[in-house]
């Protein structure tokens, strides 16, 4: 009787243990169930359809803002002397023809004296010619005398014309001073002279530099590996540290054909409109050059891309809250658009917002 009871007990314990194991096994698949995006989350996230777009390659370059040297003038001394009465400072805006300073110069005094002498010689030569003509008419002078007087008069005219031209080239001032005037409107961007500075024409140092900053150059650096990706006329977007949210646009206007021997880069020039003078020379710039290619590729919003463990992924949406983590290969990025070579196909749907949060949930 006791043996029967013990056997029944053991059988009962075995059945309970078997049932417990079966119950645990049935729970395991439930514990490993794939993450399903809740309906409440589906209402807030964006699901985007994969498309094909014209392939655009974007290259990010470093550069700096520079003067537009086509709209820049260096003012050099045309005469020697002592600088007086400087009227402008570095950074001042000047109008064309505005007086910047005065040079007291013995050369200008000589030019003025030469003009006065030439005028006097012309007056004498004119009177002598008239007198010789009257004498010739009276038979008291020969034709040779008239011819000589005419030659002297013509030389006097030429000397006066030369004196006027020389004086005009040097400011056309007859009081012995050379007046420095602005040849163009713009900003004083260099000033290398002060009052009482002695200057010489053979010095080679400019007195002032004036630049019109209504447009500026942005000089970008292109490494050898990217030279073939930059073309004349390519559109360019430029940002600076000073204005991180403002984009300045221009086009590639010049590609220098010489590599810098030290940095091994090619300089690329971009002319940028600067009507509000926001861009200042020597500012650092981030330059994104855009090259539209004659091919297309899969494109998705940049917000749909996830980078993890040295690999890019997207969340391919299958409907009813189901999404798969799918590795992709990135061709290029431009703004809020990413171009892919594989991983997904046109017409697929991807999670285009909160992608990182859903990616973490799928991984966990």
Image (spheres, grey):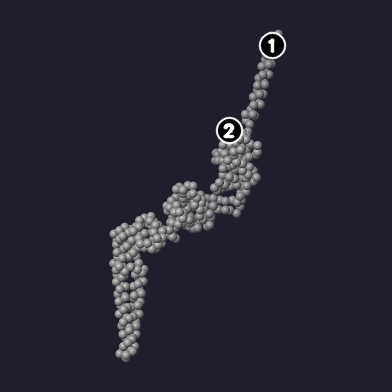
Determine the residue positioned at 32% across, 65% down.
178
Determine the residue positioned at 46% across, 57% down.
215
Q: Position of residue 263 (x, y in %)?
A: 45, 52
Mark 2 vs mark 1, CA separation in Å: 49 Å
Instruction: Read off the residue under disc 2.
Output: 364
Counting residues from the start of the chain, the first of labels 2 and 1 encountered is 1
* Other-residue count near label 1 (Cα within 10 Å), few / some / many at <14 / 14–19 / ≥20: few
Does residue 163 appear to the left or right of 321 in the view shown?
left
* Other-residue count near label 2 (Cα within 10 Å), few / some / many at <14 / 14–19 / ≥20: few
Q: Nearer the viewer, residue 251 or 226?
A: 251
Q: Residue furthest top?
A: 1
Q: Position of residue 41 (x, y in %)?
A: 60, 36
Q: Is residue 226 visible?
A: no
Element class at badge 1: helix
User: Splitting the image into 4 quarters, where does residue 342 fall?
Assistant: top right
Q: Position of residue 13 (x, y in %)?
A: 66, 16
Circle on res. 294: none
Determine the residue positioned at 29% across, 71% down.
113
Instruction: Read off the residue under disc 1.
Output: 5
Q: Nearer the viewer, residue 253 or 312?
A: 253
Does residue 56 appear to the left or right of 194 in the view shown?
right
Quarter of the image where the N terminus is located: top right
Quarter of the image where the C terminus is located: top right
């Amino acid at each position: 009787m006791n043996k029967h009871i013990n056997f029944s007990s053991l059988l009962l314990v075995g059945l309970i243990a078997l049932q417990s194991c079966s119950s645990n096994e049935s729970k395991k698949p439930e514990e490993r169930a794939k993450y399903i995006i809740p309906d409440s989350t589906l209402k807030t996230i964006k699901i985007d359809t994969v498309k094909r777009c014209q392939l655009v390659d974007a290259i990010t370059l470093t550069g700096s803002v520079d003067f537009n040297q086509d709209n820049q003038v260096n003012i050099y001394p045309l005469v020697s002397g002592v600088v007086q009465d400087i009227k402008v400072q570095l950074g001042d805006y000047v109008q064309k023809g505005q007086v910047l300073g005065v040079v007291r110069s013995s050369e200008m005094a000589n030019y003025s004296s030469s003009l006065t002498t030439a005028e006097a010689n012309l007056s004498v030569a004119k009177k002598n010619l008239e007198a010789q003509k009257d004498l010739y008419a009276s038979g008291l002078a020969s034709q040779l005398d008239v011819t000589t007087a005419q030659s002297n008069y013509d030389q006097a005219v030429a000397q006066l014309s030369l004196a006027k031209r020389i004086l005009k080239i040097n400011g056309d001032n007859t009081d012995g001073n050379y007046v420095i005037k602005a040849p163009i409107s713009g900003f004083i961007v260099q000033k290398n002279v002060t009052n009482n500075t002695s200057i010489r024409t053979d010095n080679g140092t400019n007195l002032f530099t004036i630049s019109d900053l209504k447009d500026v150059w942005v000089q970008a650096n292109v490494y050898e590996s990217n030279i073939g990706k930059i073309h004349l006329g390519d559109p360019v977007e430029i940002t600076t540290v000073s204005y991180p949210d403002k984009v300045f646009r221009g086009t590639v206007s010049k590609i220098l054909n010489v590599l810098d021997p030290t940095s091994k880069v090619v300089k690329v020039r971009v002319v940028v409109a600067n009507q509000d003078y926001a861009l200042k020379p020597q500012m650092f710039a981030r330059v994104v050059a855009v090259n539209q290619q004659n091919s297309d590729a899969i494109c998705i919003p940049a917000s749909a891309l996830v980078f993890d463990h040295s690999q890019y992924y997207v969340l391919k949406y299958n409907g009813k809250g189901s999404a798969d983590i799918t590795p992709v290969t990135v061709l290029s990025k431009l703004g809020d658009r990413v171009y892919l070579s594989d991983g997904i196909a046109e017409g697929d749907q991807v999670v285009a917002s909160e992608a990182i949060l859903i990616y973490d949930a799928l991984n966990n």
